[in-house]
Each structure stands twice: as C-alpha cells, then as structure tokens.
Image: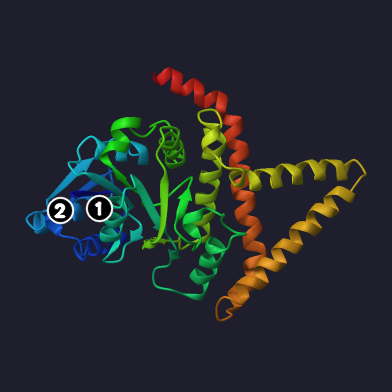
Amino acid sequence: MIVTIGVIAYNEKNSLGSLLKDICAQSYDHKKIEVILVDSNSTDNTKKIMETFKKNNDVDFYGVTVLSNPKRTQPCGWNVVLNNYHGDAVVRIDAHASIPSDFIEKNVETLSSGEYICGGFRPNIIDKPTPWKETLLLVETSMFGSSIAPYRRQQGKTYVNSLFHGAYKREVFDKIGFFNEDLTRTEDNEIHYRMQKAGFKLCFNPEIISYQHTRNTLKGMIKQKYGNGKWIGLTLSVSPKCLSYYHFVPFLFVVSLIACTVIACLGYPLLLEILLLLYSMFDFVNTVSCFTMRDIHIHYFLLPFLFPLMHLSYGFGTIIGILKIPFWKKKLKKKG
C-alpha cells in the first residue's frame, strides 16, 4: 500500500524539523511513503525547511512534494494535498505534532484489515517542560478543562465520530469529495460527519499513537479556545449535525452565567449562587484530581482559575460565532 503523508504548515519553523525527523524514522518502507508538504504562505523559514527536506530525502521516499496554499486556511491546505496525492491512502498529520516510528505501519495494518478510515490515541505533550508549561498541559489534558473527544482518552478499539491524525483510503474522498473550505476550525468534524453519512466507519485503534504539542503560553491557549468556540458557533449554520453536545457545554455555562447574573441584579441571587457553587465544586474536584497526577508545583494552585478562563473563552467564542452567522453568511454569498 502506497501511503501519502500530508502536512500543512504556517510559520512552524520551530516544530516542523522535529516532525520531519519523525517521518524519516518511520519503520514502514519509505519507498511506499509519499510526503506532501504544503506551506500556507509562511513568513518564517517554514517553506525553506520543506524544500531542504525534499532536496535531501526525495530519493529515499516514493516522492516528496512541496506545494503552496495561497488561501492559508487548513481545509484549503488539505484540499491541495487531496488534489495532488498519489497514494492508496492519505494520512493527515498536524505540523505541530510528533509521531512514533511505527505510526504509518500501525495505520497501514488497520487499513489493510478492512477499515477505510482509522486513527488512534493522541495525548498532548509540551516542548522543553517547565512547571508553568506542565500546568497548562494539565488544563489541556483534563477532561474538565478540555473535552471528552475519544482521541484524547485511552480506550479499546471501537468506532467513533471523530479522529485526529486520521488515515483515509482513497475511496473515501473519491466518494464524499473534499474539505469544506468555508470552515476554518471545524472542517474535520464536518467531513467526518459526511463520511459517516456515506456509510464509512471511523475506526479508533489505541495501538495507533501520535502526539500533539500543547500551546506553551496562556495567551496562546486562550486564543485557541476562543477560536474553537467561535467556529463551533459559525458551524451551526452550515452543518449542525456534525457537532456533539459537549461542544456546547462552555456556551451553556456562559449563557447561564449571564442570565443568572441579570436575575441576581433584579434582586434574586439564588440561581447565581447555586450555579457558582456547582461550578466551584467541579472546579475543586478536578483541580484535586490534577494534583494527584504529577509532582505538585506551586503553579498548580492556579488551576482553579485557569479552568474557568478556558471555559469562558470557549463559551464567549461560541456566542460571538452565533452572533456573526448573518454577517458570515453574507460574506460567503458575496464571495460566491
């Protein structure tokens, strides 16, 4: 089986080199691996790193191609890959990721067993660990701070609604088409929904493991959560069925908080007190749970404040996304 690895990158000079080393270390026959690297108009040395990799490794692989994504967004980048790959299957790998040496081999084994789509466990890791970065990692990996997406949780082999770093046989995209380029953050939810509607199953195999690098700064993490929430809101107008209930938990929390605050200002504070009490209980329990996971650092005492920051950022993002739907749809219509 010829496997195409697709990597889309924008200003990833600090992490791309490590991922390319991981690709070179794959145990699967390199003559059966095609590598397509897509640069999204980076302003750093990302494209130069890609071109150097092609120059040094083109002969070792089935082929190495460097392409451009002038539209810059992720779905547009993946469509560049899908318009140019030659493999029997394509594997989507985030530029800010790491993969073990058996990653492609495990995916091929799963696809060869009769599956059309597969993926696996994707834990978060950090670059150059410090107590503060480990604290942010705890926020990201905690079920309370992040989500219950199956690829974040270790479990047995099963079928799921969404995957990260998925592998797809060519027949899948031949049947359902490409990514929706109107979506910037939720394109994977939407296309996985279309895949399932077309009759394909998404196989989660815990033997397949890849790693995602967590944001190293609080500002970066808040920006990411806000953006994710905003695109959940916008996606409601395009493909609401591709979203799960857990995508809207922060939204419901923020809406409830606003409503209860208004009611409290009118002289009825009980609902607000109950909401804050319940949230504080969850916050406390999950903070204590995080304390038992690692050696305690003083930064961990910030967890009770970091959790609500993430939830508020995501929830307000969803509200803004919903409010922007009419303007966004008008913009799309104007764009044609």
Q: What element carries label 1?
A: helix
Horizontal side, residue 92 vs residue 287: left or right:
left
Q: In this view, which residue lies farthest toward the front?
A: 114
Considering depth in this image, is 266 or 111 the residue closer to the camera? 111
Q: Are marks 2 and 1 in contact (CB under 8 Å)?
A: no
User: What secondary structure is found at the residue carrying circle 2?
Assistant: helix
Q: Position of residue 255 (x, y in %)?
A: 72, 41
Q: In this view, does 79 lie above or below 282?
A: above
Give the residue at x 55% y 67%.
138
The disc labelled 1 sits on which kind of residue?
A: Thr
* Left or right side of 183 for 256: right
Q: Which residue lies furthest to the right in this view?
A: 267
The residue under label 2 is 32
* Image coloring type: rainbow
Above or below 299: residue 268 = above
Which percent across, then down, holds residue 80? 26, 37
Residue underneath mark 1: 46
Mark 2, other Cα within 10 Å: few <14 / some 14–19 / many ≥20: some
Of callouts 2 and 1, which one flags the residue occurring earlier in the amino acid sequence?
2
Q: Residue at x 84, y 54 (%)?
A: 274
Near-viewer residue (251 or 263): 251
Residue 306 screen position, x and y as percent: 62, 62
- Is residue 177 at least partly visible in the picture? no
- Identify the image quadrant of residue 157: bottom left
Q: Which amino acid does label 2 sit on?
A: Lys
Image position, residue 164 (x, y; %): 41, 51
- Left or right: 142 with respect to 5? right
Question: What is the quadrant of the C terminus in the image?
Answer: top left
Whether residue 86 is visible here, answered yes or no, is yes
